[in-house]
Amino acid sequence: MAEIDKSDWTHSWKIWSDTPKPKRSKRWILGRRSSPASNTKAQKQHSTTNLGNYREPSSGSFKPQSSGIETPEIYRTTSHVESSSAGIELTPLSKSSGDPGADHTDRGLVNTSPISPIASGNSQRLSGATMSRGTTSPMQTRFREELEDVPLHYKPGGSLEQKYARPPMDCSSNRDPTQSRRSPLALAFWGLSLFSTLGSFLWLIAAIYQPRWGRLISSGGHGLSPSTASLLTALLAKLIESAFVAVFVFTIGQILTKRSFDRGSTGMNLAEISMRNWVIQPGLMITDAPAVRTAAVTTLGIICLVATFAGTLYTTASDALVSPKLKFGALQWKTLQTNATASYAYLPYMRETCVTPIDEAMDGFSNDACLAVALSGGSYHNFKTFLALWHESPPAEILSGAVVMTNRPKVKSILFDNTTMTAQWIEGNYSDPSLSFQSYNRVIDNVTLAMPHPGVYTAAKDPANGILQPSELSGVGEFEIRARAVSPTVNVLCANMQRRELEPLVYSEWPNAKVNSTPVLGQKIGWLGWQQDVPVVGEHEWLNRTVVDDIFRWGPQYGRRPPVFSMYPMEFNLINNATVYASDSFYILAKSNSTRDYTLCQMRSWMSCKCSTQFNVSGTTGAHLRAHCEDDSDEASYQKHGPHMDPNQTSRDWRNLADEWNLALYLNSGLVNANASRDRILTQLILTQPKLSASLPSFAEGIAALVSSTLTAGSMDTSLVHDWPNGPNETVPIIRPPEVQSFRALIRTQEYTSSYYTDWQSVFYGVLFIVFLLNILCLFYFTATLKGRPLADFTDPPNLFALAMNSPPSDRLKGCCGGSPDRRTLGAPFGIGYSACANHYYFEERNKADLNNRWGDHNETTR
């Protein structure tokens, strides 16, 4: 038979046998196989001497000091050698050491060894608890099965009981639970905590301040592209979230571990240990509901629930509040600048800047022809669009009979083929024909049209003003400008007059007039040089007086001369006059087929102070330039804060432009009775009653729509304010190089902003704040409570498993080895004990000190 090496377990048993043990009746204590010399008499009363009484001699072998402590007497092992194997069997102590056949009434295994039980003389103590020889209990049966099925690493031939009962001399901790301030764990926590705290602080500040990134995030090549910025934001938010989860889980572990070491605390329980899983894997809160119900009612549990909620939603909160997204800012005043080159409606400059491939070397009149085409094209486009607006959807206010001028369809135009311009009817108090009829007893059609200043478009596109364009915002950006700028304006004043009332203004009706006949029977026209017969301008020459002098402001009291026409037009025809010396007006005489009266119209233009120009640009819906006029609440209105211009300060240059426009459209076709289609449409709009039509525009409105192209063309590259360097109509109408002029404007731009889209998303501010606050608390706990020295986290699964495997079993967890703990066991408190002599840490039950410590003295189990 092979001999068994006894040196390893004998030396441990000497220490263990002399250690005081609490008396536990009816429990199995399996000792180690020992030499006969070590089988001394058991001590009846337990000594207070602990493992600290032993030291390791220099020889390297563990020898106990003389303490008089003998081997416990409850049950001992006997050894025998059989031919097939060597093993250990349990032998109950008999009532009489000398009677091998005596009954053994105590619980235990029957000793079948031929060798007598050790220290049989001490068996009388258990005489009242012995069993009959050969009787086997269910517990004995289980231990026999375990003896066969469970291998022991400590020695061959042991049982499960031996695992639980042997002293932990093979687990001397190789490191202290408290680590230094420069340990890898401490440095890792510092790095993660500082990153998470600073990151969550910056995220919270960004969400509150809502910075606008301008060109730092744009698609114009000046900074990060929007997609890259969104990706980086999501990445950083995820890193902050991950760092926060790591820091918080670490802090929870530190709190529970420190509490477990503190003797005066309740330690920790299984439900609290599982709290770290909530933060790491929130879904486990559903599968581990009993632990949640147990731990969630504590202060630390509530904090963990809040941290779980915040950690789960942090990336979502970042996407809602911090991730850059296109958003409008607030309206703010800003000084913009633009280049002013010419005065309003200066015809030579307009000809010079008209773009055509035919230069002056090829044709000396190429610029004139170019401008004529531009004016005629714009006029017909605006006129046709205006008529279409009336046909498609007349406003409900008009159809119901309202005649408020500002509610009627507005004239629209196109600028640079990509911007819609919308004009505004102004001075509506002069536009009611019924009121004018009461004053003058005739039908008067008086409208005033204000166009937005196209210079605002130029200023918005000027890089010097730093306005982000839609092309720089992935093609979907927007901005809005409310410019304090003057608006080019035209007034069309028409009055119906009888034939005889017009005689002072028609040359063919003058006495001694030189006339010619036309193909139309009875129609006369002045001779080719009839204008030579018109009296020249003089100090006292104001031509003939008419019944409409006060309406059109003619005569010496007004300092203005009336026009003279060569003939009466036929029905559906127009004739005009633009030859009045030093005049600011352009005149039209028309004849409708629906009335016997003729209609005389006067057109004048100026820069109005009653409006502001609003420019809205969108990458999806396009650009829109509109005039916003006569609104007392409009802070950008020019008349509120700018210099007021004399209403009579009309533009004489515009009269020259109107004459050029007349040549382009040939409005004098009535001289030859051309019956032009344009004239036919216009003359059918002439009012026959002193009221505006609810379904048709008036003649004055039609003329205003037709002439509106001159307002846009005449205001290109002109000043947006009235203080032209030498006055609006001075002799220096062109400045080279252009003068940089400033104007004020209310601006609201769309930029990539760290903000939310809708108001309900502001609830995520709480998530960002909670994460930042918990980061601060974790950092404070680490520095103030732990002094920067972390503990080994015994809630971490590897540490928890190692400590549990080297800890004694607990009655509080009885029945939980094969399944999940119930609520009672989930809340059972445990602490961490320490045996100084063995340098061993283990779990111990709390709140029952007399039963807790099985392997150590309570006086030395607290760190």
Image: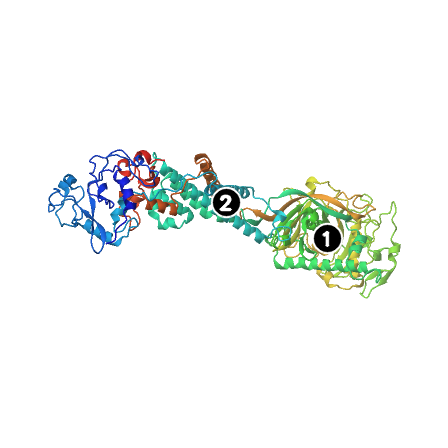
Q: Residue furthest front?
A: 59
Judging depth in this view, the residue of 381 and 163 nearest the camera is 163
Instruction: Judge the density around disc 1: few (<14), some (14-19), many (≥20) Cα neighbours within 10 Å.
Output: many
For residue 662, which quarter of the picture?
A: bottom right
Instruction: Judge the density around disc 2: few (<14), some (14-19), many (≥20) Cα neighbours within 10 Å.
Output: some
In the image, residue 418 sits, relative to residue 825, either above or below, namely: below
Q: Give the label, 1 or 2, closer to the camera.
A: 2
140 on left or right of 233: left
Alpha carbons under labels 1 and 2: distance apart: 46 Å
For residue 784, which quarter of the picture?
A: top left
How far across and down, in percent of the image, does residue 175 sit? 40, 41
| Secondary structure category for the residue under label 1 | helix
How far across and down, in percent of the image, does residue 82 sit? 20, 54
| Three-letter code, disc 2 | Ser
Residue at label 2?
A: 762
Residue 712 is tagged as 1
Lower sequence index among marks 1 and 2: 1
Judging depth in this view, the residue of 643 and 315 nearest the camera is 315
* Residue 684 shows in this picture: no
Q: Quadrant of the N terminus?
A: bottom left
| Secondary structure category for the residue under label 2 | helix
| Three-letter code, disc 1 | Thr
Judging depth in this view, the residue of 469 and 303 nearest the camera is 303
Q: Residue at x 22, y 56 (%)?
A: 84
Q: Residue at x 56, y 41 (%)?
A: 209
105 on left or right of 696: left
Q: Residue furthest bottom?
A: 519
Q: Quadrant of the C terminus?
A: top left
138 on left or right of 399: left
How far across and down, in percent of the image, does residue 631 sit? 64, 44
